[in-house]
Image (spheres, rainbow, N blue to C red):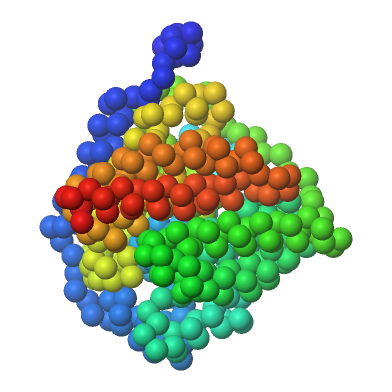
C-alpha cells in the first residue's frame, strides 16, 4: 500500500479485528467444551497448607508469573518464562520467526529483566515469607506477584545491565510490594467495593515510584549502557491483518515487559493445559478462564483497531491495558458470560490507551512509563465497573 495512503488511515485492519475476535470466541467455546477436574490441581488444594509445603510454594512461584493475566496457572507461568526465552533467542539469532523485539527493542536486556523477576519474587516468597500470609484466618490469596510486573523489571529497562540496579530494585520490590498491596486491599479497595485489581495496580504505581526514586538517589546504583542489539525486524504495515493479529497476541505478554507474540503463544498454551487438567485451577479457582481470555482478545483487538495510527507514528501504544485489568476484572466481578466479556473488553479497549497516554505525559523524570500504564488500569477498571453496575443487564 502506498505510504501516503497509509498515513491517511485512521483505524486498523477490519479483517484483523474480525480474526482476533474469532480467536477469542474459539478459546471461549473450545475451553467451555472441555475442562478437567483433577482435584490436586485445583486452586483450593494448592493453597491448602501452602505455608508449610515447599512443593506448593514452588507451584505458587510459577503461578505468579501469570497472575497479571488472571490465569495464575502453573503451566501458564512456565509458558511465560519459556516463551520469553524462546522469543529472546530467536531475536538474538535474527530469526524471521522472532516477532516483535522482546523488551521493546532492548532484547539484550531480557536476561536482566527475567533475573529481576525471579530474584524479587523468590525474595518475597522464600525470604521475606509473605507466603505466610496464608496462615491468617480466611486468607485465600497473597499479592506476591506484583514484583514480576512491577518495579524490578521496569528499573532494569531504565538502568540497563546494572548489577547494583538489579539487586536494589529486586530487594526493595520483594520487600514492599506484597505488604502495600495487602494494606491497600484491606483498607481501601474492599471498603469502597472496588475490583481487587484496582488495589494491585495502584500498588504497582506507588511502589514503582518509590523504587525508581530510591534508585535515582542511591549513590551505589549505576546506569549501564545497553549493548546494541541489531533488530532484524522488517518495516511492516501496521494496517495489515497479519500485523494486527500478531500485535493482539503480543499484548498478552506486555505486562511482564516482553511484548512478543511468540511468548504469548506459550502463555496461552500453558493456560489451556492448566484448564484441561482442572478448570478450577486458573483465575484463583473462579472457573472463568474462557471468558477472561475472550475479554482479553476483545480489549486488545478494539484498542489496536482504534489506535493503529498511534503504532504507525510512535511504534508502540498502551493497548494492553484492558488485557490485564478491565476485561478480566469485570468478568470476575459480573460473571463469566459473553456479554460481560465483550462489553468490559471493548470499553477497556477504548479507554485504556488514551488514559495511559495522558498519565505518561505527567510523569516526572526517572519514573518508568509503566507507572502511567498501571494508573490507567486502575482508572479504567473503576470507571468500567461503575458503568456496568449502573446498567440493569449486568447487575
Residue closer to the observer: 364 or 251:
364
Residue closer to the observer: 29 or 366:
366
Residue placed farthest to the left in the image?
A: 33
Does 179 appear above or below 86?
below
Q: Is residue 79 visible?
A: no
Tell me where residue 393 appears, x and y as whole percent: 16, 50
Q: Quadrant of the N terminus?
A: top left
Image side of residue 193 versus residue 357, left or right = left
Residue placed farthest to the right in the image?
A: 219
Tell me where residue 391 appears, x and y as whole percent: 22, 48
Q: Is residue 131 visible?
A: yes
Residue closer to the observer: 256 or 200:
200
Tell me where residue 245 appears, x and y as whole percent: 35, 35
Residue at left offset 41%, top offset 76%: 141
Q: Quadrant of the C terminus?
A: bottom left
Number of residue marks: 0
Image side of residue 391 versus residue 208, left or right = left
Q: Place residue 77 in its image quadrant.
A: bottom left
Does 322 appear above or below 207?
above
Residue at left offset 48%, top offset 14%: 7
Amino acid at each position: 500500500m502506498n505510504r501516503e495512503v497509509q498515513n491517511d488511515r485512521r483505524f486498523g485492519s477490519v479483517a484483523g479485528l474480525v480474526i482476533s475476535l474469532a480467536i477469542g470466541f474459539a478459546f471461549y467455546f473450545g475451553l467451555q467444551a472441555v475442562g478437567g477436574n483433577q482435584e490436586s490441581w485445583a486452586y483450593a488444594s494448592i493453597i491448602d497448607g501452602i505455608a508449610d509445603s515447599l512443593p506448593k510454594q514452588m507451584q505458587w512461584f510459577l503461578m505468579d508469573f501469570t497472575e497479571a493475566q488472571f490465569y495464575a496457572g502453573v503451566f501458564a507461568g512456565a509458558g511465560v518464562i519459556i516463551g520469553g526465552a524462546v522469543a529472546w533467542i530467536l531475536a538474538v539469532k535474527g530469526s524471521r520467526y522472532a516477532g516483535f523485539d522482546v523488551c521493546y527493542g532492548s532484547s539484550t536486556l531480557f536476561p536482566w529483566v527475567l533475573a529481576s523477576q525471579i530474584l524479587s519474587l523468590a525474595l518475597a516468597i522464600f525470604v521475606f515469607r509473605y507466603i505466610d500470609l496464608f496462615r491468617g484466618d480466611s486468607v485465600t490469596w497473597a499479592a506476591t506477584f506484583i514484583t514480576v510486573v512491577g518495579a524490578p523489571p521496569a528499573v532494569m529497562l531504565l538502568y540497563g545491565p546494572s548489577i547494583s540496579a538489579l539487586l536494589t530494585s529486586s530487594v526493595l520490590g520483594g520487600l514492599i510490594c506484597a505488604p502495600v498491596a495487602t494494606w491497600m486491599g484491606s483498607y481501601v479497595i474492599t471498603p469502597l467495593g472496588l475490583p481487587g485489581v484496582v488495589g494491585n495496580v495502584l500498588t504497582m504505581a506507588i511502589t514503582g515510584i518509590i523504587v525508581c526514586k530510591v534508585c535515582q538517589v542511591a549513590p551505589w546504583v549505576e546506569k549501564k549502557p545497553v549493548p546494541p542489539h541489531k533488530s532484524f525486524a522488517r518495516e511492516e504495515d501496521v494496517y495489515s491483518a497479519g500485523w494486527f493479529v500478531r500485535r493482539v497476541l503480543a499484548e498478552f505478554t506486555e505486562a511482564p515487559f516482553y511484548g512478543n507474540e511468540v511468548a504469548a503463544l506459550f502463555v496461552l498454551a500453558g493456560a489451556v493445559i492448566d484448564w484441561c487438567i482442572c478448570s478450577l485451577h486458573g483465575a484463583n479457582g473462579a472457573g472463568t478462564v474462557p471468558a477472561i481470555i475472550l475479554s482479553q482478545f476483545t480489549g486488545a483487538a478494539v484498542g489496536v483497531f482504534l489506535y493503529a495510527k498511534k503504532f504507525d507514528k510512535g511504534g508502540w501504544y498502551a493497548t494492553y491495558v484492558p488485557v490485564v485489568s478491565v476485561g478480566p476484572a469485570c468478568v470476575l466481578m459480573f460473571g463469566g458470560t459473553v456479554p460481560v466479556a465483550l462489553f468490559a473488553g471493548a470499553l477497556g479497549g477504548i479507554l485504556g490507551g488514551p488514559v495511559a497516554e495522558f498519565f505518561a505525559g505527567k510523569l516526572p523524570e526517572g519514573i518508568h512509563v509503566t507507572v502511567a500504564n498501571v494508573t490507567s488500569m486502575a482508572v479504567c477498571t473503576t470507571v468500567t465497573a461503575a458503568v456496568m453496575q449502573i446498567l440493569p443487564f449486568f447487575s
